[in-house]
Amino acid sequence: MTASFGEAAVQLCGAAATLLGWRPSEFWAATPAELAAALGQMAPDADGPERDVIDALKRRFPDE
């Protein structure tokens, strides 16, 4: 069973903090490719967020 985007983000943020010493800002600034390269095969299998979740986040946190 795959984790939801939110569940996977929590797991990955925790792994990045514990294993890589990343702060949350470093985790969220990293691209998925950078995170995958840093964690290797330890990343959980998860689906990406749904389009409506992305749209809501873009409205809440617009690029400046």
Image (cartoon, rainbow, N blue to C red):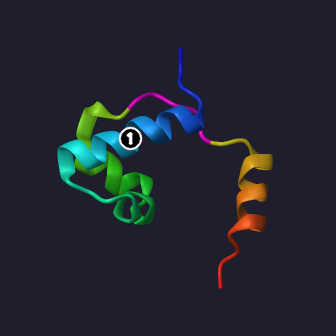
Kindly identify the amino acid type of the residue bearing the numbered disc 1.
Answer: Leu
From the image, which quarter does the C terminus lie in?
bottom right
Q: Which residues are magenta?
A: 44-48
Residue with the most extreme top position = 1
Q: Residue at x 52, y 31 (%)?
A: 46
Please indicate whether residue 24 sits to the left or right of residue 50 in the image.
left
Along the line of sight, which residue is nearer the eye, 28 or 39? 28
Please indicate whether residue 39 sits to the left or right of residue 28 in the image.
left
Please indicate whether residue 54 sits to the left or right of residue 28 in the image.
right
Q: Residue at x 72, y 41 (%)?
A: 50
Q: Which residue bears the numbered disc 1?
A: 12
The crowd level at tag 1 (other Cα within 10 Å; few <14, some 14-19, many 20+) is some
Residue with the most extreme bottom position = 64
* Residue 62 placement (x, y as % from top left): 70, 74
Q: Residue at x 35, y 64 (%)?
A: 26
Q: Secondary structure at mark 1?
A: helix
Q: Residue at x 46, y 39 (%)?
A: 10
Along the line of sight, which residue is nearer the eye, 12 or 47? 12
What secondary structure predominates along the stretch shown in magenta?
loop
Please indicate whether residue 35 sits to the left or right of residue 55 in the image.
left
Q: Does 46 appear in magenta?
A: yes
* Residue 41 placement (x, y as % from top left): 27, 33
* Residue 9 placement (x, y as % from top left): 48, 42
Q: Does 51 appear in magenta?
A: no
